[in-house]
Structure formats: structure tokens, C-alpha cells
Amino acid sequence: MQTIEANGASIPAIGLGTWELRGRTCARIVEQAIKLGYRHIDTAQVYENEREVGEGLRASGVRRDEMFLTTKVWTTHFAPRDLERSVKESLVRLRLPEVDLLLLHWPNPHVPLAETLGALAMRGSSDLLAMSGCRTSRSP
């Protein structure tokens, strides 16, 4: 499988997105995707399926160290105290001690990014931290 190298991590280039997957269907799809060869699974707090993603991961029989798991923190949880609690809750739902990539789902203009990143760095719940959903403006 083709991978992308970033900060010492080998990230599978193709992953299974789990947006709009729910319940037992989500767990089964994740399990089957892994059995078919997917090694990168993407979920998020706002998808409300982290528990099922974790179930599918465990049911697949593939070792955790062979997988790359991404989850995303929702914007309402970017304040440092909220962030720590929120990440812990995600890990409990996934039934994992850490994820491979922890993303901030969208920018939140009401919480300084420096505060959020500082709290993430101290948390130790992932080796890779990033922001998704950013819009950039480019000149034509």
C-alpha cells in the first residue's frame, strides 16, 4: 500500500472515511474494509461513531500497530480544559490508549490556536497533530 511519510509516521495514502456510518453497520463496514486491506480509518467526534469504529477495528483481527487511526476534535472543544476531556472521551469510546493522528476538525476563531495546540502537545494522545477543514485563499 502506498504511504505518505510525515514527521516520522507512515500514513496509508488511502483511508476509509466513516462520516455518516452509524451503529452496527459502521462496525461491520470498518471490519470488512480492514479485512480487504484498508489500513487507515478516519473518524471524528461529530460523526458520533467512534465506539463503532473501535469495535470494527477490534473485530477485524488486524493488530493495532498495523493500522493508522485518525479522529478529529470538534470545534466546541478547543479550549484547553474542554480539549483534554474531549480527547479522553474519544479514546474511551474507541477503547484505545492513543490515536495515530489527532485533528482539530475546523478552525474556531473564538479559541486562540496557540492555546489549543499547547494543550494538545501536553496531552500525549497522539504523535501527530494537525488541523483539517482549513480554507486558504489563493490569488489566480
Image (spheres, rainbow, N blue to C red):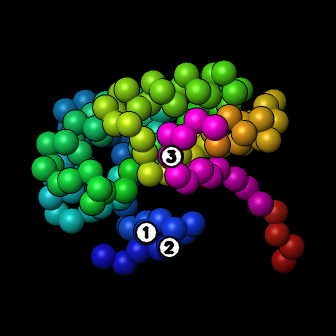
Q: Earlier in the sequence, mark 2 or mark 3?
A: 2
**Residue in the picture at 28% in, 38% down:** 54
Pick whichever, 41 or 83, lies toward us: 83
- Span of residues in magenta: 122-136
User: What residue did someone put label 2 on?
Assistant: 5
Residue 22 visible here: no
Is 88 contained in the magenta span? no
Q: Position of residue 82 (x, y in %)?
A: 63, 22
User: What residue did someone put label 3 on?
Assistant: 126
Q: Position of residue 20 (x, y in %)?
A: 38, 39
Name the chief secondary structure element in magenta: loop
Q: Amino acid at mark 2?
A: Glu
Q: Secondary structure at mark 2?
A: strand
Q: Amino acid at mark 1?
A: Ser
**Marks 1 & 2, CB-CB < 8 Å contact:** yes
Position of the N terminus by quadrant: bottom left
**Residue in the picture at 44% in, 35% down:** 47
Q: Amino acid at mark 3?
A: Ser
